[in-house]
Structures are given as structure tokens and as C-alpha cells.
């Protein structure tokens, strides 16, 4: 336990590194809502105080770095860029990278041996192995000239070779190095549409599929399409994945927050959504869309079917586009919940193309595959008129197309090996091994958080995160306030300095004012979970002891 | 020749397909400059007349497609999206795709056997083969578990295996499926910086490199950073690659055009740039940056060193960011020109970080590699203060990172096999074979265009395009006007209907008012060039005969 006790040296390091971060701008832990002071306070006290104003005043020293001739400075760049924040890669990560360099040059200078990145859903960075079949197919498509070589049969499974041939046949001229149709290769979109239809039991159309470099560019495209000015709003859950707040800020719209109810397992109450919609309308905001993240990020809940039906009904009635972030659709860890797409729900309610505008985002980065670096994904765009879809196509075409390997992988994810295929058994073992291990890790971490003094944690039903709430002693909150940082940012900073664990403060996602949280991924490899638990437990106990009232 | 004669049936088809395109919006062949009527007329007469107004009025039939409940229509989407145009994937391509489908179902219904896509620099779609060494390395990095298998040595070259190992060592945890640093993997950026330094003879810093999914996202990021409102302008060459006009429109700025001088081989006259800068200033526009495309797209010229020095001097003096599109740096086809990067030029003038803000864009899609589908590229950002670079990093981080295969490929392109490597000879043969063939094709097409009645064509010194000027008979121009389309759009449409050749009208790139051009890529495979020449020659002769005064 000695190494986790917070001695004078560690405290001094923590305070110094916090001061450094403050100079670099701790504001990244927050975002502001332009139209509503109550929304502003969603960030919670001190963090909101340090959030960037539309016209920030950087210190003269930094703006003069380039001498008087520099034509670009913080004073004259696009204020929307300044306003945009992205906590999961914010200052806590920059600080972690500094510590990592320090570990390399002077390993004994820190009270831990490695940095453990629990800040982001990046499974393979924490040693999750890729699905063999997927990688076989990708490699063969990259270098098709080995496809008919004898040695290839010794190195690759027969169905991977078959699949690579089939995919190459779907690519005009077999040219994996050519720009494709801007929505993605037609044959691959057909495969994906068939996968969606099989998943949902309702038809899907390849013309509705837009393949993208991960899910993020699809979200940006929709925000770009819908947001005309700050008078246009998007309803987003709070807490939310900060892609949404960042994208809304970059495209100059207004985030209209609705709060998830922590007391009911991060429940989505339609009455709350309706209240926020009315409040926004009363302030002159035209609300264009509702974002739902299911399974939830950072909150890990899985929506009940009845709740999804209410949401569909609400969007239908209010004329809102339903933006459904469904990238964690394979990540379900409890027996009493299952994933249903919003498309399936709306179709099963009898709502067709004419009744609801619905965009579903999917990614190759999550699920059991976790292929973040491949940047593959798609959005399924339904309920939009042909002329509006042509505008989406036009915006997609300005960037020509998404990367072909990512496109291929998206088709594989929606059409994995089937019974009878040579790889089926090994594929199933790999997939189930990853998912069942994730479920065990989620359970173990949830239990550990709930056993900490002053910490409560809803169960992780899905996705890759836990979002425990911190009930911090008043003295700890005062210590944070003295440094002008949010208490949860103070906590994660101290956690990093003491243990090497990188987690993201709740203020980066938004939370009910006066509450404090931390988002941890459940991704550390299973054999490290016990050590992670003992590290954060020791840290937490020492911190509580330090500040006990 | 019979099949190229424009008989009644073909003319009827052309007119009908033009009418169809008009209904779908021929406006895509133009863009408008918000601040200047003279700039507006850069599109030339009739096309400008059909360019979209900021508040277009789509036909009621299209907006009612989804019934009254549809929450999204052309009337309420972001007008910046409506305004954005991207000609190289515009209506001419949509029409080509329709004809391609028609060819499949009813081959005898059209006077050609195949569609030849000369609209876009997409070499591998026209059967250019990828560089073997690059693909070997990509395949091995995709599926590293075969790296130490015996069979692998029979399938892959030794230096590809070595390189894959080296690259994997540069990737934290060897995880090619993990998100990387948002600027790209540090080790790959080091390789790229070393490649730039070797190319230029001046140092390059990996912290200045931002790896991107092709060059386009880098251009978008810079536009997003620099453009605050329509009062901010970007100086762009006319003709220009429409990524620039599209990106400026999407980010709400103003394109400030400067004309390249066709009479001096698409010369870039500083006096013209200065004149346009002053005119913009007098209209209250703050000009933030100057775009230079070298080698030129769509114009194919290569700037002389003295000209580059003038440009650097101008940007330095006027406090403009120099946005240097250098994606065709390997595509030089004449002995009297060579490529020098703007960074090399500025450093050789003694200008350092403090003196000029310079962004160089590079892509894996062009050069001899032509790996468009891999979506790899980078921008080298120099002369920006640390705090502004942090803002660029933040925007990059919202999309997490560019795809890792594209990152690897960008490092390979900037560090290809060297003498002594097993692949060096075959690599050199592949590279030189492609580049010398491109030079021969450029020469053959240039000669053919110049031999046509009423066509003049500057030489293709570099890049992948020729941009011949059409001096059309008055009757042809009247025929186009009767359909309310630009004469060059009319010409390319008729060309497609008669020959299957897809080329882009000059009005998609901008041109001096009253002049008409067509952009053709030089990419059809060499054994097809003679047939292409005879097709467009016969078409052109028939068209001229049809409309001879």
C-alpha cells in the first residue's frame, strides 16, 4: 500500500502538474451551451468558470511566440474552433503522454511502471487481439496478387481466400486502390444492407448506406446538413459522448441538453426531453434532431424496448430527426437486455420512410472487433427525400470516398463467417471470448467502484464504460476550487499522478450540476483488472483520508 | 467514322439527357463568389445564370416527396451545403453511371462499349497497378501473425518483411487496429519528416506533420480554422481544383479568385494576385490565405522557381498563410521543369518559422503510387504558434485519427526502397514505368487536342490533367444557351453520349468569362490512348461540322 499513500512528494507533483495543465487550459474539461445558463451549469461550478468564452484572451506570451508577423493567432481563428472541446483526448491525455516520456527516461521518478489508458474505447491499444478472419481478408484484399499462389493456402483460411475473391469481384476492376463511389462500393453496401435486414427483420436498402471513415464523419455530415446557425439546436443526452458537443460547436449550432436519470440506471425520460425541447423553443431555438446513444456512452445503459418506442413516437410527433448512435450494438453484457436498432423499433411500430427521419451510425471500432485504427463505419439514412439525400451525397463526394479497407471491414462486421465456413468455429471462439471477458471485466469494475467509500456506480449493461459518481468530501472540493478546476478533473489528475491510470472527468461529458463522475473504460486486459482495482482503491482511500471532514 | 457521326437518334439522346440533368440541377457545374459580380462571371454566361442562389427554391414536387411530415427539406438545410459544388463528381458522373447501367442491360443501345472515366485523377480505376512493395508491406501490417511463418518468405520480398517489422515496432503495442495519436503515429511521422528533409535539404519536424485521410481533410481543417465568416477570404487560382471552392463554401468563407494566364502556360502573375487581393480588401474582405496548386490542377503547369519565390515573398509581406497543394510532386513530365516544395523555396530564401505560415499538403492518391482508395496523406504545418497548432490538433482529435493503413502508406511514399534493398530494382522499374508512360500519354493527348479545329491546349508539364480550350462555333454556343447550360457542359455531355468518355467542363473549375474548357485526365492506359484520341477527334469533328457557321 505504501506506494499509493499520498505523501508530500506525490502531492507536490499533483499540484504542479495541475498548475501546468491550468496554464495549458483546463477548459477542455467543459463545454458551454450558448442559450441557457442552466445548461451552462451542467458542467458544474468551477469547471464552468474556466470554460472558454467566445472571445478568449490568451496570454500575451503565447500569442507573441511567432513574432508580430504571424498572420494566425488565437485572436483571429474561427471562434467555433476555439469553442469546440473534446475531453477524451484533452489535457489529461497530454499530461499522460508527458508522464509516459518521463517513465521512459527516468522510470524510478514515478510511483508506477506504466500508463494505463482507460480514457478512450480503444481496445487494441490495451492488447485486445483483432479477429483473425477479418485481418486475413484485409491482407488478401491489400495484396491480391498472392491470392492464387500455393503458399497462400498454408497461411490463410479457405473462407478468407473465398471472401477476398468475392469482395474483389464487387470492386470495379478489382481496384482496391481506386476511389470508390462516394457512398462506398455498391457491392459492399449490398452486403451491409443484407446484414442490417437480417439483424432487424425489416428490409434495408444499399442506397441508404453511406460508408464513412469511422462513425464520426457521418455525425459531422449530419450536423453540417442540419445546422444553419446557433438558432438551430440538437437534443443531446447529458452525459454525452463529446463528439456531439464538439461537432455541434464546430458547425455553429446549439446543444440542447436532456438529462439522463442516474437514479434509474441512466434512464431516458421522455418528460425530460419534452421539457428541454419546450424550453429551447421558448428561447427561439429550432430543434432539428434528437441524439440517442444506445448502448450508452459514457453511461453504459441499454434502452428498454418500451423506452425506444416512446423515443420514436416523440421524434415522429415533433418532427425531429432521430440520430441513433448504435456503434455499441454488439456490446451487451447482461441477460435481461438486448440490442434493438431504432430502425427495427420504428418499423415494428408501423412507421415507414414517410413517418420518421432516422439515421443509424455504426462503426468497426467497437463491438468485439474493436478495429479503431481501420476507420470504418457507415450511416444508414432513412426517411429523407431524394433531393436531401443528394445533398448528403454531394458533401460526401467532396472528400471522394472513405478508405476501402475500412469499407471492406464494415462489410465483414455486418456479415461475419457463418456455420459451415472453415473459420466459423475459431471466429465464434474469438468473438465470444472477447465479449464474455468484457462482461466479466465490467462486472468486476462495477463491484469494485461500488465498494469504495463515497462512490456509487450503475451497472454496465453495454458499451465499454463505467461512469461512477464521486461523492467527494467538502475539503477535496475546496482543494479543487482553490486550483480553479472541477473536482472530478482534480480527482482524475491526482489518480493519474498516483497510479498511471488515465480516466476522463465527468465534466467532459456533462453531468447534473453539483455531481461529479469519472468515466473508465472496461478495457484493461482481464489479467490486469485485479491490479487496476487495487490501484484505484488504494488511491481513492488515501484521497478520502487526506480530505476527510 | 459512322458511329461518331451525330445522327438524329444521338442528338435526341443528348438533348433528353441534358434535360434530365437540368431537372436534377445543372448548377453543379458552377460556383458563385458571394462578394463580386466580376468573380461570379468567372463561371461564364449561361452557367452563372443557373448557379444556385443562397436561398434556392426547389420544385414543390421534390419537396413534397416525403409527405408533409418530413422534417428536412432543401428549404431548411444549411444553405452552405446547398451552395457547395463539386464538379468532378457532379451530374456528368451521375449521367455516366446511368449510361453504364444501360450498357449492362442493353449493350447495343449505345454507340460505345464502355464508359471511360477521365473525370477524376483515379489511376487504379483505369487499371494502373499498385506498387508491389507498398502493398506487400500493407498486407503484412494488416495480418502480422504471418510475419514469422516460413511460407511468408515465399510470398513476400525480404525488405517488405523487414519494413513491416520496423513499422510495427513504431506502433505502440504493434496495434495497427488501435486509434493512434491524433496527428498520426509518431514513428511514421518521423519517417515522413526525414523524407521531407531529404527531399528539400532543410530540416523537417515530425511535430509539424498531421496525417490525414487523403489531402482533403487537411484542407478542410485549415479552412475551418481560418474562416470566421463570409468576410474572410481565401485567394484561389482560377481555374482551381473544386475541393477549394467546395470547402470554402462549406465553411462559410469567400473565395477570392486570381486568374492563371492561359497565354503564358497558365502562368501565375503576382500582379494579378495583388490586384485581386486589393479588390477584395476594398470590399471589406479579410484575406487569410493564398492557395497554390503546384503542379497545377486542372491546368498541369509546373511553377518556375523564380515564380515560387515571388509567391513566398508576397505571402510573407501580406501576412497570408500559404496553402501549398503539392500532391502532384512526383508527377513531372518535362525535362525543363522540376518540383521544389514551397518549404524548400522559403527556407532557401532565408525565411524561417517566424517569417511565413506555410501548409504543404501531400497525398498517397497521386504521384506514381495513385493509391486513392487508401485515403492517406499529410499536411506539414509550419510557421504557426504552438497555441494555434494545439487548436489544429484539437480539431484533428475530434475525429480521433486517420486510418492506419493510410498512415503507413504515407510513410512508405516518403521513404520508398533504397539502393541495396531487395525490392529496389523492381520498385524502380514499376515507378519509372508508370511515370514515363504518363509522360507519353500526356504528350500524345496534348498533340491530339492541338490538332483539333478550334482547340488549343497548353502542355502538360505535370499533374494528371490537360485543360484544352474550346473555341466553339457561335451556333454551338446558342444550342447550349437554348438549354440554359454552359457551352462546355453541353460539349462534355454530348461527348459522353457519343463516345462514353467522361470529362469535366471547365465551368466546374472556373475560367475567364467567355472562355470554355474541358478537363481530361491523362490516365487511360497507354494502349487505349489511340482509341481515345480517335473517339474524341471524330466526335469533335462531327460536332464542329454540325454547328459550322
Image (tube, coloured by chain):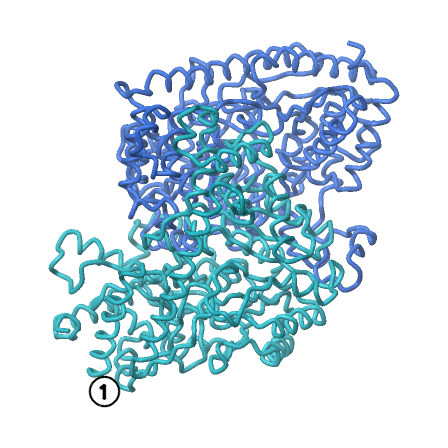
Chain colours: A blue, B cyan
Q: Residue at x 75, y 40 (%)?
A: A49
Q: Residue furthest right?
A: A8
Left or right: where A37 falls relative to A371: right
What is the crowding at mark 1: few (fewer than 14 residues within 10 Å), some, or many (at least 20)? few
User: Looking at the figure, which quarter contains the N terminus of chain A?
Assistant: top right
Residue A441 at what x, y percent from top left? Answer: 55, 14
Element marked by disc 1: loop
> Where is A267 relative to B13, above or below?
above
Task: Compare residues B30 and B415 and report the one nearer the observer.
Answer: B415
User: Looking at the figure, which quarter contains the C terminus of chain A?
Assistant: top right
On what subunit does the disc labeled 1 rest? Answer: B
Task: Compare residues B358 and A76 and report the one nearer the observer.
Answer: B358
Residue A306 at what x, y percent from top left? Answer: 40, 24
Left or right: where B291 falls relative to B150: right
Numbered disc total = 1
Residue A215 at what x, y percent from top left? Answer: 47, 39
User: Which residue corresponds to mark 1?
Assistant: B548
Q: Residue furthest bottom?
A: B549
Q: Residue at x 83, y 52 (%)?
A: A61
Amino acid at each position: 500500500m505504501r506506494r499509493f499513500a499520498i505523501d508530500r512528494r506525490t502531492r507536490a507533483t499533483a499540484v504542479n502538474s495541475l498548475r501546468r495543465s491550468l496554464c495549458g487550459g483546463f477548459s477542455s474539461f467543459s463545454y458551454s451551451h450558448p442559450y441557457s445558463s442552466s445548461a451552462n451549469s451542467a458542467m458544474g461550478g468551477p469547471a464552468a468558470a474556466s470554460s472558454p468564452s467566445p472571445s478568449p484572451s490568451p496570454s500575451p506570451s503565447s500569442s507573441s511566440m511567432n513574432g508580430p508577423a504571424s498572420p494566425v493567432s488565437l485572436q483571429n481563428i474561427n471562434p467555433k474552433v476555439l469553442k469546440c472541446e473534446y475531453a477524451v483526448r484533452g489535457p489529461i491525455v497530454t499530461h499522460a503522454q508527458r508522464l509516459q516520456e518521463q517513465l521512459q527516461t527516468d522510470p524510478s521518478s514515478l510511483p508506477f511502471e506504466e500508463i494505463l489508458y482507460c480514457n478512450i474505447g480503444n481496445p487494441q491499444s490495451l492488447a485486445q487481439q483483432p479477429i483473425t478472419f477479418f485481418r486475413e481478408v484485409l491482407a488478401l484484399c491489400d495484396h491480391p496478387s498472392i491470392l492464387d499462389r500455393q503458399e497462400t493456402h498454408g497461411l490463410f483460411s479457405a473462407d478468407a481466400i473465398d471472401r477476398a475473391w468475392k469482395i474483389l469481384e464487387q470492386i470495379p476492376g478489382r481496384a482496391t486502390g481506386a476511389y470508390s463511389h462516394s457512398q462506398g462500393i455498391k457491392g459492399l453496401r449490398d452486403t451491409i444492407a443484407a446484414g442490417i435486414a437480417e439483424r432487424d427483420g425489416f428490409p434495408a436498402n444499399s442506397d441508404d448506406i453511406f460508408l464513412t471513415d469511422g462513425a464520426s464523419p457521418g455525425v459531422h455530415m449530419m450536423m453540417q446538413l442540419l445546422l444553419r446557425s446557433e438558432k438551430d439546436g440538437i437534443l443531446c443526452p447529458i452525459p454525452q459522448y463529446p463528439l456531439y458537443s464538439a461537432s455541434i460547436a464546430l458547425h455553429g449550432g446549439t446543444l440542447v441538453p436532456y438529462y439522463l436519470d442516474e437514479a434509474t440506471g441512466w434512464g431516458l425520460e421522455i418528460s425530460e426531453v419534452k421539457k428541454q425541447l419546450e424550453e429551447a423553443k421558448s428561447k427561439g431555438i429550432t430543434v432539428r434532431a434528437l441524439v440517442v446513444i444506445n448502448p450508452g456512452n459514457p453511461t453504459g445503459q441499454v434502452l428498454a424496448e418500451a423506452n425506444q418506442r416512446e423515443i420514436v413516437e416523440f421524434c415522429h410527433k415533433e418532427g425531429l430527426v432521430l440520430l441513433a448512435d448504435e456503434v455499441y450494438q454488439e456490446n451487451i453484457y447482461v441477460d435481461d437486455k438486448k440490442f434493438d436498432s431504432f430502425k427495427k423499433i420504428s418499423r415494428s411500430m408501423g412507421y415507414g420512410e414517410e413517418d420518421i427521419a432516422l439515421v443509424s451510425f455504426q462503426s468497426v471500432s467497437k463491438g468485439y472487433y474493436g478495429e479503431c485504427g481501420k476507420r470504418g463505419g457507415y450511416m444508414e439514412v432513412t426517411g429523407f427525400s431524394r433531393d436531401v439525400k443528394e445533398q448528403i451525397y454531394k458533401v460526401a463526394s467532396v472528400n471522394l470516398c472513405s478508405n476501402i479497407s475500412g469499407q471492406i471491414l464494415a462489410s465483414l462486421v455486418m456479415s461475419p463467417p457463418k456455420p459451415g465456413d472453415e473459420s466459423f468455429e475459431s471466429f465464434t471462439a474469438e468473438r465470444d471470448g472477447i465479449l464474455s471477458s468484457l462482461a466479466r471485466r465490467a462486472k468486476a469494475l462495477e463491484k469494485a467502484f461500488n465498494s469504495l467509500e463515497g462512490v456509487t456506480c450503475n451497472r454496465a449493461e453495454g458499451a465499454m464504460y463505467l461512469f461512477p459518481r464521486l461523492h467527494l468530501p467538502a475539503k477535496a472540493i475546496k482543494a479543487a476550487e482553490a486550483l480553479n478546476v472541477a473536482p472530478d478533473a482534480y480527482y482524475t489528475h491526482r489518480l493519474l499522478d498516483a497510479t498511471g491510470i488515465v480516466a476522463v472527468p465527468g465534466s467532459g461529458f456533462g453531468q447534473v450540476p453539483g455531481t461529479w463522475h469519472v468515466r473508465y473504460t472496461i478495457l484493461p486486459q482481464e489479467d490486469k483488472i485485479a491490479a487496476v482495482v487495487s490501484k484505484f482503491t488504494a488511491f481513492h482511500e488515501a484521497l478520502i483520508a487526506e480530505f476527510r471532514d
